[in-house]
Image: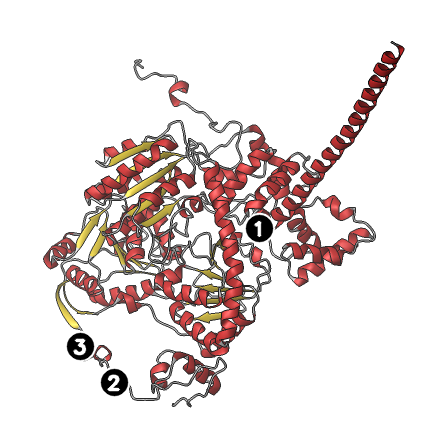
Amino acid sequence: MRIPKMGKDAAGSQESTSGTLSRRNFIAASAATGLAMGVGQPAAAAPEPVAPKPEDALPKGQPEMYVGTTAGAMVAQLRAAGVHTFFHTNVSGNVPFFEAIEAVGDVQVINVTHEGQGVGAAAGYAMASKGLGFFFGGHIGTGNAMSNLYNAWKDRVPLLLSGIGGATEGANQGADGQEQWDNPLVTAPFTTWTATLVPGDVTGLLRRAMKFAFGPPSGPVTLGGGTGGTEQVQAPIYKIDPATMRYKTRAQADLIQKAAQWLIEAQNPLFVVGAEVGIEGAYDEIVALAEKLSIPVTETAHSLYANFPNYHPLFLGELEAVRFPRKQDLLVSFGESFTTTQLDPLRGVPVVHISHDPNTLGRPIPLDLPILSEVRTAIRDLSDAIDGMLTKDRMAKIRATRLAEVSALTAQLKQSREMALRARFDSSPLTWERVGYELEKVLDKDAVIVPEVGTQYYKVLRQLTMGGPNKQKIGRTVGQALGWGVSAAFGVNVALPEKQVVALQGDGGFLFGQSETLWSISRYEAPMLIVVFNNHVYNESRDRNMQNGGHFYEEGKDFDGYLGAPNVEYTKIAEAYGLKGEKVNTAAELPAAMQRCVKSMRDGKAVVLDVEIAPDGPVISQGNWYQRHSIAEIRKKKLNQSA
Amino acid sequence: MYGARKKILFLVVCNVVVWFSAACLGGRLSAQATANAQSDKQTQIDKGRIAVGQTCATCHAGIMRMAQAQKQNQEQWKDTIYSMIGRGAEILPDEIEPISAFLAATSAQKAPANAQTAETGGGGRGGRGGGEQQGAGGDGRAILQRTCQQCHDLATAQNKAASEDWNAVIAKMTGYGVRLTPADQQKLIDYLNGLAK
């Protein structure tokens, strides 16, 4: 099909003189002819012959065949998908797999001493590398793995977990045998697919597992049945490129046209940017589109990545808190799933949702215009459609007027944050803001931040220059099951050895079984910084429990919030694993301690920085109260007494 | 001698008159200053009420009840406001004092007998799950509780002057930033008109 050549478009731009059809003209022409834009159609629509590209040549020949053990076939197939880092927790029965690993010579096994932390590390690795995270362990560790498996599922992380879940020893099912359970779908709620490895089709099964891992929707896959044995097989090895594994979609032109028209007609449109922008790396495109019409940009409270520069004059902050512009009349979501977002503030506002995941479109909220597309492509198409509908003069006028309003507002909000920072700048215990302020001063410009703290996280993150070429953020996990942050940060550091990696960790979250990861951090000499925000309380839940008053607020009692008694010495935990520990009690101590931390990281040794933080939220009269119970006191028989 | 005594008496009288006048004037000025201060404070509180409705109530549906429960003074509320700004609340520099004044004034009030118990169901340990949840839609009473009572007592709805029109009141409140769909606005107006009958 040949697209008719266009005359001057609505924006007054000239028709193409290069002989090729621009994306803008293609969209206009597609709409004019009623052509639905889909995968592969741009090439078909090109008006002139296009020179063939070597990389697009028709594949010839058969897949490479592997001959050897099933364990060797598994290693070969993983390597063919670019997977060279295997996270692992100790279990018996993987000798053939280890032999295959040693034979190939280019696979690194990363041992983690607990399956849950191992899965968290593999997830962090996948999120940072944008590849596939692979973990292998024993089926008996399935229960341990479940918490961070759930987190990875909520975060849509492509993960392959071998030896986790699945059927146990087939012949004995139902017998309640040792280390057995009956349900082969034990991990099904938190996976995109679950299966059991069978020797007959190891590589085919792995190929399908990777297909389900990358989706869409992407997410974890569990394969029970171990990592293969010594059975001899001939198996095809499938070349898999993680970058192109997820099926790509492109929006129909009429939908893009409609969205562009809505954007132009709206007086107060608002953008929300979500994880898919980060996953696709569409950072420059979203900034350019926002700047085209000076549209303010928000993120949700649980945005996984720094999808938009937080220092940009168009960046307002959290969607949940958005107050300006006063009367929004259009919300456009770029890859934000809304799965954790309350949209009450925007009830009644038309919503356009662009996502590469058909599974998320229209689920939590009804949509006015759902668009299934790669986010990066949709942004570009939308930008071109706007170019085709507005004259340059009109675009400039809209941009200038709105930019003046939004940037004046963001400047005021910045001033408010500065006042909040300065109000208790020298307080001890310290404020979250002060720690963020000092981190910004000492960290590399492109450090990677991995937070696992409550809603106080914004107090730290808004002090850091994030997004674009600056610091990046991975987490907090949308799943919010505590016990993720340190392991995920470790996985990030494995994937990004050239970057400074900083885990921001609440003391309560650290106590959710995370010290085990310090063993791996020490073993593999990951020069990370782990900041423990130590306020001796589960501040977030206490805040919510107490903010509306009631009996326990009046009594000043919190049954499950106080974490002191004992006050944990996190520096000593670090030292127990051979890492460096730094303790900060006062604001005056912090700058020098930060300098020592950075020096240690540069020298190659991780640091646990334990900072005394002031709790916030409603103050209760007995902040250190807990329901006391002493077994030593109540026992009738003392151990030094004979029976 | 008599002349000197008369002069002294004259000076004393003058002095008394001046002092008395000054005292009266001072009293009036003092009263005026007090009235002005009260008026300024009320202006601050009113400004704070609007800002609270636009900002705090976005996440804290029961902000009035919360303020009454916590009984904090203005300085303590200012600390809370700084904390909330750190968390991302869009509060402008010139709203910090008014919001703290409004919340302190609200804290000083007794919690209304008809205060609704906020939903504080199971939530996460570190996220926004649980806590306060706002339901969507609902009848006029639910909308009143969910939206208007974030800043106003129920008595405000029951004591409306006959000359006031709920359509105009709701239009004014949406102008302040209250977010209600046209359908919910109509349900609310119908409910409020029903209260007056």
Residue in the image at 53% along x and 71% along y: A264
Judging from the image, the colouring scheme is secondary structure
Q: Quadrant of the N terminus of chain A?
A: bottom left
| Measured Cα–Cα span from mark 3 to mark 2 | 26 Å
User: Residue type at mark 2?
Assistant: Ala
Label 1: chain? Answer: B
| Measured Cα–Cα span from mark 1 to mark 2 | 56 Å
Q: Quadrant of residue A97?
A: bottom left
Q: Nearer the viewer, residue A170 or A27?
A: A27
| Measured Cα–Cα span from mark 3 to mark 1 | 60 Å
Between marks 3 and 1 in the image, the one whose residue lies nearer the viewer = 1
Callout 3 and callout 1 share a chain? no
What label sits on residue B58 in the rendered view? 1
Q: Secondary structure at mark 3?
A: loop
Q: Which residue is mark 2?
A: A51
Across and down, in percent, residue A368 comes to 54, 69
Label 3: chain? Answer: A
Q: Secondary structure at mark 2?
A: loop
Between marks 1 and 2 in the image, the one whose residue lies nearer the viewer = 2
